[in-house]
Image: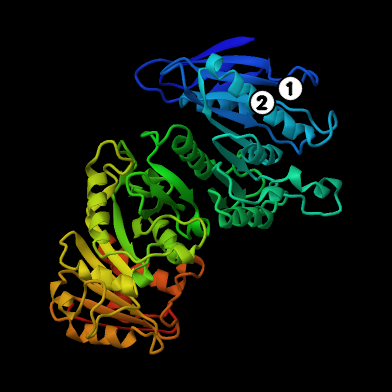
Amino acid sequence: MMKRITTMKKTITALWLLMLTVTATAQAEQHTIKVTENVAYRTDVGPNTVLDIAEPLFGPQANRPAILIIHGGGWSAGSKNDMVYRTLMIDYAMKGYVVCNMNYRLVQEAPMPACIEDVQSAVRWMKSNAQKLGIDPQRIGTYGHSAGGHLSLMAGLTAGVACTAGGAPPTEIGNPNIPWAQHPEWWPIGHIGKCATPFLVLQGAEDPVVKARLTEDWVVKMQQAGSSVDYVKVHGDHGVAFDKQLEFTRPAMDAFYAHHLKHNDPSVSFQQMKVPDFGGSGPHKAVALREQTLPDFVVYRPMNLDAAMQVGRLGMFETGSVKKEKLPVLVFCNGGCMDTSIGYENMLADVASYGYIVVAIGQLQMYAQHEKDQHTPSSMVQQALNWICQQADDPNSPYYNKIDKKRIAAAGHSCGGAQVLANAADERLKTYLILNAGMGKMTMADASAKSLKKLHAPILYLVGGTDDVAWKNAQMDYQAIKRVPVVLADNTKSGHGGTYEQPSGGANSRMVRAWLDWQLKNKTEYEKIFINGDVSDYPDFTIKHKNF
């Protein structure tokens, strides 16, 4: 059976075996999808080894990327006819992929590992029919959820696909007494090693069916073995990446497939996504991204930029009831002048979740890789600032008209604080935050006491008591600064490491955000902290200021 689905700029309803609603935002031209149902990918084992095919009739008709969708259901239930998988098939066909949505033999029809063999057969069928389907056999990816996630990962490990995504994927049988557990070759945990196939794993933290700890055990072991495994963990249960938390998981899938199957489709700006600390404590849940145009940095930002720009409602009788405001920016430099912000991601995601865009030095790391950390030059601050300003003015950028170039701060921890001071003269910076750092009489990262004379905006020093090795230098800097407003906040018991790795970045992160809200968002209620010294909400802090 073959059907055609045509979409313009509006939502359309397509009649299949059941009613399916598809929403597609097309360009000016008409987009048409050809759907062919119940095509047998193997004929030797019964009637259920069939798949549906959605083919774009727009764009190139040869050497196209392809995705194989594998349904869930505990290996004993489920079908390609589930609305979620049908809708997903159409959505990705509308993005230019040839999509196959498969059934496989359930365990009551044929015991494990028949379902694994069926997925392998479906991949072989797609490759052998690549010319007929108009696909590139070297650009086939897979997706599945739950049992389908397990089968999708197994396709990546055993079927030679280009990339693999799995939502809530069982990587092993947690109970060793279950017979299936006696066959590690049936499970991803039995294939630990360096694999050429890149993986994307999507997991709900509170999933009662597929435990996050088992998923993470496999992810970390594969990463440590040298495999490319992106891991997106968000609050949620077993429905994550199926019908829940799609605002996180679907963009992650879009970027993953665009990077590995379309080789950086310009319609998707980023390559990797991570959700640190479940998106922060603020109202606009944040993500960490590796942007294609800024690969040596991490961009922490609200997942929904448009929602984060909404600052209030206008008069009830006015049209356009929501007022929008461009987002302020923080450039962040890491302790040790290192090329990773993973030790600060809780704080940086938390700041972003309150309506900031944070650009941090160092590539996105899915887990800590200390043996790979390298020192970075202070000139990377300029690289970040230039990128920010370019993105703000580029009509093709997702940040166009969303970044406020007049509200940019720079912050750095320890050696990163010296990197900030090395760039003190840059007029684009409207405030500075020096965390557990200070120059005193020393020279570091192209900065020295002479750099203090180049300050032109208010500056916050945040230190960790007399046990902080930077405490004395910060005191000396405070005394030496004559021209600009300066605050010295001392979290007397936190030490040099501060609280940045605590959930939401701890008290130091809240102090950083209070300063940013005061300096960049003009929230004058924070004057009580920095001018009046009111630390009632900050136990163990002392505050002093001058030059205001």
Q: Quadrant of the C terminus?
A: bottom left
Where residue 86 sits in the image (x, y, percent)?
A: 61, 25
* Direction from residue 215 to residue 254 in the image, left or right: left
The kind of residue tagged 2 is Ala
Q: To which residue does mark 2 refer?
A: 122
Q: Compared to 547, does 227 lie above or below?
A: above
Q: Which mark is on residue 5?
A: none
- Residue at 28% across / 85% down in the picture? 473
- Residue at 37% across / 59% down in the picture? 362
Q: To which residue does mark 1 refer?
A: 49
Q: Name the element at disc 1.
A: loop
Please state which of residues 152 and 406 is positioned toward the viewer in this rendering. Answer: 152
* Direction from residue 380 to residue 212 in the image, left or right: right
* Direction from residue 100 to residue 427 in the image, left or right: left
**Dot 2 surroundings within 10 Å: few (below 14), some, or many (20 or more)?**
many
Where residue 203 sits in the image (x, y, percent)?
A: 61, 49
**Dot 1 surroundings within 10 Å: few (below 14), some, or many (20 or more)?**
many
In the rendered image, which quarter is residue 374 located in? bottom left
Q: Are marks 1 and 2 in contact (CB under 8 Å)?
A: yes
In the rendered image, which quarter is residue 212 located in? bottom right
* Direction from residue 371 to residue 486 in the image, left or right: left
Residue 522 is at least partly visible in this image: no
Where residue 349 sits in the image (x, y, percent)?
A: 43, 59
The kind of residue tagged 1 is Thr
Task: Give whichever of discs 1 and 2 has the lower sequence position.
Answer: 1
